[in-house]
Amino acid sequence: MCALEAGSPFGIAAALLLLVLVAATLAVIAMTAARASRPPVPAAWTPIEILKELYARGEIDHDERDRRLGHLLHSGDPGHWP
């Protein structure tokens, strides 16, 4: 009797291990593709430049932008705001 014969415990374990490896590989590929589709935020951006970008993309509304801007302006080094 072969260890990888149909119905043997080792054959079932090997099939399950292969299934897990394939699923993990597909998950890594999907996560990498999702991460690549987002535009990167340059490390040199100031907090206010990031805030402007969030507002421009529509990810935050006018009131949220003003609230965060006020916090940044009163907290020290705000960067540049035209």
Image (cartoon, rainbow, N blue to C red):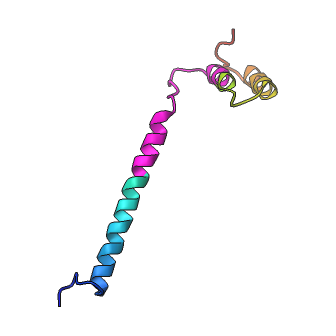
Q: Position of residue 18 (x, y in %)?
A: 32, 68
Apparent side of residue 11 relative to residue 73 in the rendered image (left or right): left
Name which residue lies at 35% across and 63% down: 21
Q: Which sits in the foreground, 45 or 34?
A: 34
Which is more toward the observer, 35 or 44? 35
Q: Which residues are magenta?
A: 28-53
State whether residue 64 is above or below residue 26. Answer: above
Query: Predominant secondary structure in magenta?
Result: helix
Horizontal and vertical percent for residue 52?
A: 66, 20
Along the viewing direction, whichever of 39 and 47 lies nearer the viewer: 39
On screen, residue 21 versus residue 37, left or right, reads left
User: Which residue is at 78% across, 29% downward?
Assistant: 64
Q: Residue furthest front?
A: 6
Q: Residue furthest bottom?
A: 1
Q: Position of residue 69 (x, y in %)?
A: 75, 22
Q: Quarter holding the N terminus?
A: bottom left
Query: Residue 33: horizontal and vertical position, in percent?
Result: 44, 41
24 versus 45 height, above or below: below
Which part of the image, by quadrant, shows the C terminus?
top right
Q: Is residue 66 left or right of residue 33?
A: right
Q: Residue furthest left?
A: 1
